[in-house]
Image (cartoon, helix red, strand yellow):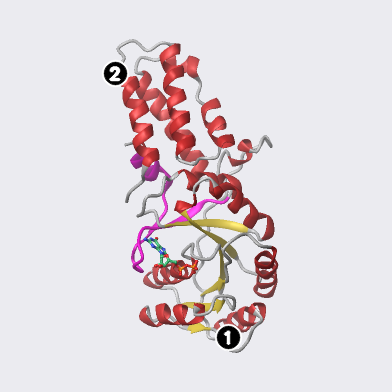
Amino acid sequence: MVLGELGTALAGALKKLGEHTVVDEEIMEACLKEVTRALLQADVNVQYVKNIVKRVNINELAAGLNARKLLEKAVFTELVNMLEGEGAQNAQNEGVTTKREKYAPKKGVPNVVMFVGLQGCGKTTTCTKYAHHYQKKGFKPALVCADTFRAGAFDQLKQNATKARIPFYGSYTETDPAKIASDGVERFKAEKNDLIIVDTSGRHKQESALFEEMRAVAEAVNPDMTIFVMDSSIGQAASDQAAAFKNTVDVGSVVVTKLDGHAKGGGAISAVAATRAPIVFIGTGEHIDEFEAFDAKPFVSRLLG
Ligand code: GDP
């Protein structure tokens, strides 16, 4: 997986620090500046960068014997905390930190999971990948296409679902996405599917029509989980976009797609901070198997080189 510029820049900043035999506060300060620059260039929201850096205690570090290791560890811990949804509230200056548990569907009960995101983020692809992932674990997934906005959306879902041998529901004639969503969910509940995935429509930008529709679908199906799908290449827009979705529906999980491309990686961190919802999976290619359960520690390890 290519983690892009953030990893290279952070590793560079930390390597420079390693070149000094004696590390004083000044050198540490300069190194932290580089870490800051790397995070900002990688599209981590400025507010969160300030927070990360603030929480790295320079005095404590400068007194240590191996300053590079200590700084590396401090940056590592802060990034992991941030990605796991911890520290997000601090970033918004609200004081208390809480960590949201990662959602996983439970066997034997009908889990309804709704996917939201802008058009082109990889939502439909991700729905099938998610279904396929849990099918391999013994779930009985089903896909509902509540996207009536994009021509061809139902055909795409149908094609993906057929290939993966997953039952699907949609309509060529019904124009109300909330009605399709609730009919589909009812059908699959009756058929004892235990993971019912609802794909909603996207738009090119954050428009009020999209948000109204999302709210209506959410009301119609009352999902156990709403997953926000974000294209990792959107850069600085990540934070605002994630917050806008979070303000409309109860986003409880994030999937970051296209991490196989030239994404800088920082957008993911900002999106998590904005939604206070952990990343559950990442997309690393167009193929159905190019989908990984997300684990913050190895992600950050690779980021730091
Ligand atoms: P939607 O409009 O959000 O439903 O997006 P689609 O699922 O149709 O995906 C848009 C494009 O992104 C398609 O060409 C997908 O194959 C591609 N795509 C989705 N996820 C990934 C990913 O993780 N990596 C790469 N490289 N492409 C992806």
Whether residue 271 is visible to the viewer of this picture, yes or no, is yes
Picture coordinates of residue 196 (x, y %)? 53, 75
Q: Is mark 2 within 8 Å of ligand 1?
A: no
Which callout, 1 or 2, points at the residue further toward the start of the chain?
2
Give the camera-side residue of 159 and 295.
Answer: 159
Are there few (<14), some (14-19), or many (20+) residues within 10 Å of tag 1? some
Q: Residue 302 in the image: x percent, y percent? A: 34, 41
* Residue 219 in the image, given as x and y percentages of width and height: 70, 71
- The reply to whether the magenta stretch includes residue 94 is no
Picture layout, residue 8 above or below residue 163: above
Q: Quadrant of the C terminus?
A: top left
Closer mark to the observer between disc 1 and disc 2: 2
Give the residue pinned by disc 1.
187
Image point (36%, 69%), residue name = 288
Q: Is residue 228 above or below residue 214?
A: above
Q: Residue at x 55, y 62 (%)?
A: 118
**Amino acid on which the number 2 mark rests in the picture:** Glu
Q: Which corner quadrant of the image does residue 171 belong to?
A: bottom right
Is residue 285 within the magenta segment? yes
Secondary structure found at label 2: loop
User: Magenta part of the protein: which range?
Assistant: 277-303
Q: Is residue 69 left or right of residue 214?
A: left
In the image, is 260 to the left or to the right of 200? left
Question: To which residue does mark 2 refer?
Answer: 19
Mark 1 residue type? Arg
Q: CA distance from mark 1 to mark 2?
A: 64 Å
Q: Are marks 1 and 2 in contact (CB under 8 Å)?
A: no
